[in-house]
Image (cartoon, grey):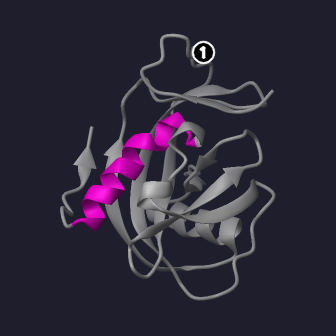
């Protein structure tokens, strides 16, 4: 089984575990013209780096931990992009867990260094805004990427749903 991601999908599986809080980040290059995406190891989709917030940590602590674990690098900067809480945002994982996911999503840049991917990623690639492979992006991250483009273009108002 591979991970699947759903938004406004009537065929999405029903959640079977409590709602989860995530802390993903849209990672920009120094120009803001490209975004770094990971090819997930648990499915054939591309998505944002980041992950779940543990019970004993804040959202920003989880963000920094996840980025360090998944890229081997630290963040040079991060800003709140938005809170994505549509209850139809469903993630179904290979272990059988199906959950609604609320994402406190950030946008930022990595500090210089050598990218070292974790076992959670097959690959990472910098995509120009016009080159993002939308058909292969996790459904739960489409809106965040669209909002990131708006942020880069100058509207820095955090998105909240």
For label 1, the SS is: loop
Q: Does the magenta stretch include residue 150?
A: yes
How many numbered tags mark residues here?
Answer: 1
Q: In this view, does 51 lie above or below 63?
A: above
| Residue corresponding to mark 1 | 13
Image quadrant in which the C terminus is located: top left
Q: Which residue is at 38% across, 42% downward?
A: 143
At x 29% / y 66%, what residue is drawn? Answer: 152
Quarter of the image with the N terminus is top right
Res 150 quadrant in image:
bottom left
Left or right? Give the position of 111 relative to 96: left
Q: Is the magenta stretch mostly helix, strand or loop?
A: helix
- What are the residue bounds of the magenta stretch? 137-153
Q: Quadrant of residue 158?
A: bottom left
Left/right of residue 115 with respect to residue 65 in the rendered view = right
Residue for point 42% across, 21% down: 8
Residue 132 location, x and y as percent? 50, 52
């Amino acid at each position: 089984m591979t991970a699947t991601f759903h938004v406004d999908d009537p065929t999405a599986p029903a959640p079977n575990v409590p709602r989860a809080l995530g802390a993903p980040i849209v990672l920009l290059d120094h120009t803001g013209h490209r975004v770094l995406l990971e090819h997930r190891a648990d499915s054939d989709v591309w998505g944002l780096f980041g992950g779940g917030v543990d019970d004993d940590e804040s959202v920003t602590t989880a963000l920094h931990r996840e980025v360090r674990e998944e890229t081997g690098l630290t963040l040079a900067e991060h800003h709140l992009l938005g809170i994505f809480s549509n209850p139809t945002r469903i993630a179904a994982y290979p272990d059988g867990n199906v959950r609604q996911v609320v994402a406190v999503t950030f946008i930022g840049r990595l500090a210089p260094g050598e990218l070292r991917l974790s076992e959670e990623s097959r690959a990472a690639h910098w995509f120009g805004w016009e080159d993002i492979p939308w058909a292969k992006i996790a459904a739960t991250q489409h809106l965040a990427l669209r909002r990131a483009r708006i942020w880069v273009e100058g509207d820095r108002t955090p998105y909240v749903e």
